[in-house]
Image (cartoon, rainbow, N blue to C red):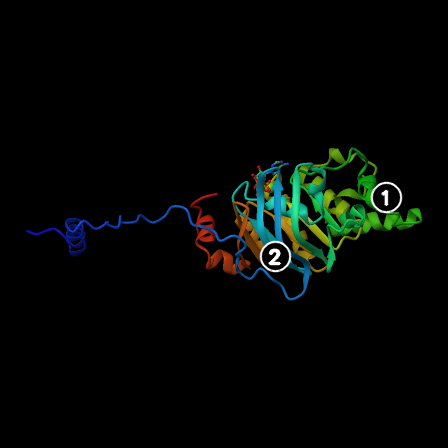
Amino acid sequence: MNTINPSMSAQADMRDQGAAVPVPEDKPETTVIEEGKTVGKPFADDPKFKLRNVDVSYGADRAIKNISLDIGRNEVISFIGPSGCGKSTFLRCLNRMNDSIDICRIKGQLMLDDEDIYHSKRDVVELRARVGMVFQKPNPFPKSIYDNVAYGPRIHGLANRKSDLDDIVENSLRKAGLWNEAKDRLDSIATGMSGGQQQRLCIARAIAVSPEVILMDEPCSALDPIATARVEELIAEMSESYTIVIVTHSMQQAARVSHRTAYFHLGHLVEVNETNKVFTSPEHELTESYITGRFG
Ligand SMILES: Nc1ncnc2c1ncn2[C@@H]1O[C@H](COP(=O)(O)OP(=O)(O)OP(=O)(O)O)[C@@H](O)[C@H]1O
Ligand SMILES: [Mg+2]
């Protein structure tokens, strides 16, 4: 029985004629990413941040490769992607937290309300009051609960009288969902609180200076599910007043809290779309591989 299929016999014919034979191609394992190209909806109608052609290097290593993205006013956007893909690096550009890293170079246009974040005359302290940050590990100062929350308002001169400062502290703790637990121990040392309480205290501290934007880098990774749920509720409540950018390794968390989700891969911004779309019908095959757990 002749088992040679037509294409094989065609190749044999070509070989006989001395022609180069095309090697049957395996499916390539790595997908080529076109630099600067992001599928989906990276732009917003009413941007709080307008970020264009952003490139970030640490010495000779490029960590962020030509990324353009808008972050909408009062939007919650999640940054997801495998470890080392540049999520924290990109997040830290938004309030110049990378400034303290000597070898870090940032190129491109980064605008907050149409003002250049990296303008040479930009007051970085004022910028960070407008764009607050909550870190992965709760990092309260070794001071009282009250003094932690009052710290920012004091250095920014936001309260002239003690009663004004008391109001700011109370309101911030209320917004962070911590008032009931903290009101009878305002003079206690903050580091004596539970991890979940400390993280909500750090959120209260960020809120106390009336920021416009809150950046959160894996804010729940050190918290148990109950404390995580509390912080997620807070994010939902806060989205009415603030723009929130959250880096997370939890796709469920991204799905629960964010309007849009941005998928990063090896320093590229591969896809940005409505969160629901990213998790149910991603446009890019790399996004799909990540959300289906094929890598990351
Ligand atoms: N301070 C630094 N000095 C040198 N290289 C750095 C520095 N910070 C980050 N990098 C490099 O930049 C790249 C992106 O790192 P980044 O921390 O932004 O990734 P990430 O997506 O936040 O990862 P993870 O999910 O693990 O937090 C990595 O290759 C990392 O090694
Ligand atoms: Mg990170």
Q: Quadrant of residue 228?
A: top right
> Which residue has dot 2 on it?
69
Drawn side of residue 64 relative to residue 242, left or right:
left
User: Toward the viewer: 100 or 194?
Assistant: 100
Residue positioned 79% across, 53% down in the render = 210
Residue positioned 80% across, 43% down in the render = 149
Residue positioned 54% across, 49% down in the render = 268
User: Toward the viewer: 40 or 247?
Assistant: 40
Residue 268: assigned label: none
Under mark 1, the amino acid is: Ile
Under mark 2, the amino acid is: Leu
Measured as percent of width and height from the top left, residue 200 is found at 71, 44
Drawn side of residue 277 relative to residue 68, left or right:
left
Residue 155: assigned label: 1
In the picture as drawn, the residue positioned furthest to the bottom comes out as 45
Distance from Cα at disc 2 to Cα at disc 1: 32 Å
